[in-house]
Image (cartoon, grey):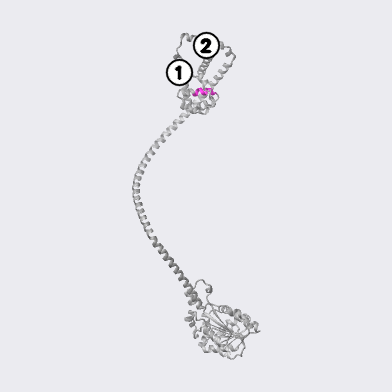
Amino acid sequence: MAAHHKYTNFYRAFEERHRGSRELIESRLEVYLPFVEPLKTLYEAPEILDLGCGRGEWLELLQHNGLHAKGVDLDEGMLMACRELNLDVCQADALDYLRGLEVESQSVVSAFHVVEHISFEALRQLVDEAYRVLKPGGLLILETPNSENLIVGTSSFYLDPTHQRPLPATLLTFVVEYAGFSRIKTLYLQDPPGLATAQQTTLSNVIDGVSPDYAVIAQKKATEDVCALFDAPFERSYGLRLVDLAERYDQQTFNHAQWLQNEWDNAKQRIQELSKSTGRLEAEINQQQAHSQWLQNEWDIAKQHNTQLQAHSQWLQNEWDIAKQHNTQLQAHAQWLQNEWDTAKAEVHELKNLAHHWWTAADQLTQEQRRIYSSRSWRITKPLRLLSLAVKKTINGIFAIPKVLWLAFKFPFKLMLAGLLRFILKRPKLKAWENAKLRKHPRLEAHLRSFKSLHGIVPEATAFSSSFDQHSSSAHTLIDVHLPHRTPLNTLGTLTIDELLSRIRTELAINKREGSK
């Protein structure tokens, strides 16, 4: 009894392992709902019989869609699964159960994966009995493995030990048609998702991509109005056939071969073009070789030149070392010059102060001279000066004073003035002070410029007088006339201010007398 109970559930366990879950099977069976839905408009309570109901997935799906169905199966293990869901089932032989039904008592007779378990003679009897019990417009649904799928037809079909032989769709369709059904539709089912619209078809798709199951749906003859209710599902196309995938694969292979042929033609044309260009390439190679030889020669020359450059670089390095030593000496000499420059700047500062003092004194004397020239006494004494001049000329005529004595008297004063100007030009502050003063006396500035040119002071005096050419035309004349005749330059530095002023006054007096004469 234990062994009997063990094998009672064998086929149920086998189905659950290899056919798929209840949810998967129910989703696959939904394809039949459009065929049975019109029955609701024809009959108030359509009678549906499912032969070999198994675990009852079809019965449960119909129940969810408002249709009642009865299931028949020989396997007690399968029927237990149906009873657990409170489905209407009974244990019986499918063909015997059909024989016990009344004529035209059923709206649908279905058998999912049943016909491959029975003999061909039993199949013919089952189809004939189904035709007998179906009402006009009623449907016979027979689903079975599709032997067009090469994997199914050669391998997976025989996984179920109760299978007898595959049934080609053409054979099953002929059996149903021979039994008298007026409209027949073959549905190819469970093909891989997306394969129908895939851009590429592989050999694996041809072998295993064909719909693994198919169903034949046959409708018993009825009026046109009744049959029209079922037109939509009957006119649709379902699934993939081996011939379709094979043609797609062949077309794809042909297209690929055509592409390869085009590529080969293009390659041959390219080879011909390359052959034509071989001569040009050889010529270019020869040119490149000649150029390479030229580059080698240039490289040898460059290496020799590089050796010379290295020797020259060593010479330059030695010269650089000598230059650095000389630069060190120059820096030391520059430091010595800087010290000398600082000493000279200090001396210039002192001389500027002294020159400023002298210029102030000379300016005062000039103003005094102008006051004398403009005074009434100068005008009153003019006859006396003229008389003195006449006497001087008379005496000069009598004694005939040599001209060389007069020149000997003027030379020391000019020498002193030249030395003073050189002294001022070598000291920037004294030079700036002289320029400021001479700017007020243009005539005196002009006389001094002439004096500098005559006595060789021009190189130093040019910079001194260039910025004052427009304002100093008369200042030089004043100094040249009234100062430089009788005071030797080499004695000027030893005089005190009072002695210098006394001598300047003496010179002015002499000039006045000469002017009156």
Provide residue 175's location: percent of width, then percent of height: 54, 86
Q: Give the residue type at disc 1.
A: Phe
Label of residue 55 in the image:
none
Provide residue 144's location: percent of width, then percent of height: 53, 83
Provide residue 411's location: percent of width, then percent of height: 45, 18
Q: Residues within 10 Å of mark 2 (few under 14, many from 20)?
A: some
Residues rendered magenta in the picture: 441-449
Image: 94 above or below 365: below
Provide residue 90's location: percent of width, then percent of height: 58, 87
Q: Which residue is at a point 47% across and 29% down the rendered structure image?
A: 345
Mark 1 — residue?
411
Count of labels in the image = 2
Q: Is residue 448 magenta?
A: yes
Q: In the displayed structure, does residue 22 sit left or right of residue 421?
A: right
Mark 2 — residue?
389
Image: 202 above or below 407: below
Q: Report the magenta stretch's main SS.
A: helix
Image: 187 above or below 345: below
